[in-house]
Image (cartoon, rainbow, N blue to C red):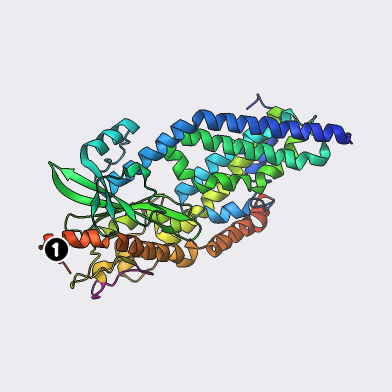
Amino acid sequence: MRSNTYTLIFTSLITLILGFLLSFTYTQLKSMQEENLAVDIRKNILRALDIREEKNEEWSNEKVQDLFNKYIKAEVVSKNGLILNNINIENIDAEYDSINFPIYYKLNDNQIDGYAIPVIGRGLWSTLYGYLALEPDASTVKGIQFYSHKETPGLGAEIEKDWFTNNFIGKKIVNPNGELVSIEVLRGKVDELSNEAYHQVDGISGATMTTKGVTQFLLEDLQKYEPFFKKIRTEVKEITWLY
Amino acid sequence: MAILSKKSRSALYDPLVKTNPISLSVLGICSALAVTIRVDQALIMTGAVIFVLSTSNTIISVIRKYIPSRTRIIIQLAIIAGLVSLIDQVLMAYMYNMSKQLSVFVSLIVTNCIVMGRADAYAMQNPAGNSFLDGLGNGFGYGAILIAVAFFRELFGSGTIYGISIIPEFVYNLGYENLGLMVLSPGAFIVLGLIVWFQKEIWKEKVK
């Protein structure tokens, strides 16, 4: 048995070395990690707006940056649906700001080809972060992507997979009367013959709580932008109803 | 494999079947339940555990003679957790996509009883070389069971293997349905139980 002093000194020493090593690594790598995170968010905005990598292709950070600068225009809208030019989008924390909301336009030859808004809310274990993109008619879903969550792999974490997100494409967030109904993630499969199928998507078996969260915060986030999208909808008359 | 002595060989090969950490020592069950829904995730987890297990075993073995016995568990845990956090940081900076895929798996490694179990039971008594081999062996033994469980769960739970559909569409049209139970944790318990039973009873008798 070693003496108390030895035990104390050795244990403190190991802790100190490990602590130093970790904080050193962290400070050295911090800027790279932050850049990766920022690029990942931009990549997700692009993907939600249907600008995505081919299979087996991986974009470098520069490529994502280039595409983002080329196609995406960022704006800030107020809760009354007005575009604010005097506020820098960098200063807005989409998770907590309840007055000003960021929005991303996809521009194709100066024509608006879609809108992306951040969607954030609770799943089962964690906060989910993602982007929901709408077509220029502000009623049809163009895409949805999640980039950060800590849900169970294979269950809740399936929300980021294409088989789940592809179900959203083409769904409507408004009913035929023009009222916001958002998207509902069901338990199980959508009954294609149902009158509600136009705004419902298939659920994930074993992840009811996660998908319930998604249904709830999609509605909450879409409500924030509703004054803005409503104005667009009155300008765009030709909403195609497939259902 | 004449390069390895008998002891090194048994350190490497025994944990694959004979002293398998999951099916015989019943260690690391928590992660075996959590990450065996799909084969691809089981593979990622296996790779990560093999790396952490062999590295932590080696480091602990090198300093084993200086570790005071009263705080040895704390020191082992600190080294394992430090190592895992370090890998996490490096992955986040250099291989961001990989780190996103690993996500919760990384923190699951710290709580994996196999890593601590091998550190305390083997690395504290044996030289670095053998400890490294023991780490590799246990990692692969863990992975073998993990992938086997994931194989059955993905096949019966989702009808796919490694994300590729195996069960043809017409079988579904005939009324076949994926077994929802397999996707949930109880499914893993059942498959794992069957594997343990198979190895302990049926296979052992055959070997005899």
| Residue for point 31% across, 35% down | A59
- Residue A132 in percent (x, y) is at 30, 54
Q: How many marks on residues? A: 1
Three-letter code, disc 1? Thr
Which residue reaches farthest left?
A238
- Residue A43 in percent (x, y) is at 32, 42
Q: Quadrant of residue B66?
A: top right
Which residue reaches farthest front?
A86
Q: Which residues are magenta?
A: A185-196
Give the vertical position of A100 relative to A31 (above or below). Answer: below
Q: Quadrant of the N terminus of chain A?
A: top right
Give the vertical position of B192 relative to B96 (above or below). Answer: below
Label 1 crowd (10 A; few <14 / some 14-19 / many >=20): few
- Residue A33 in percent (x, y) is at 45, 35
Q: Which of A89 and A64 lies nearest the eye of the viewer? A: A89
- Residue B155 in percent (x, y) is at 44, 57
Magenta segment: does it hold A187? yes
Residue denoted by label 1: A234
**Can see residue B9?**
no
- Helix, strand or loop for the magenta stretch, by majority: loop
Q: Which of A236 and B62 lies nearest the eye of the viewer? A: A236
Magenta segment: does it hold B154? no
Q: Identify the element where label 1 is drawn.
A: helix
Q: Which of A87 and B145 lies nearest the eye of the viewer? A: A87
| Residue for point 25% across, 64% down | A173
Which residue reaches farthest top?
B3
| Residue for point 18% across, 69% down | A243
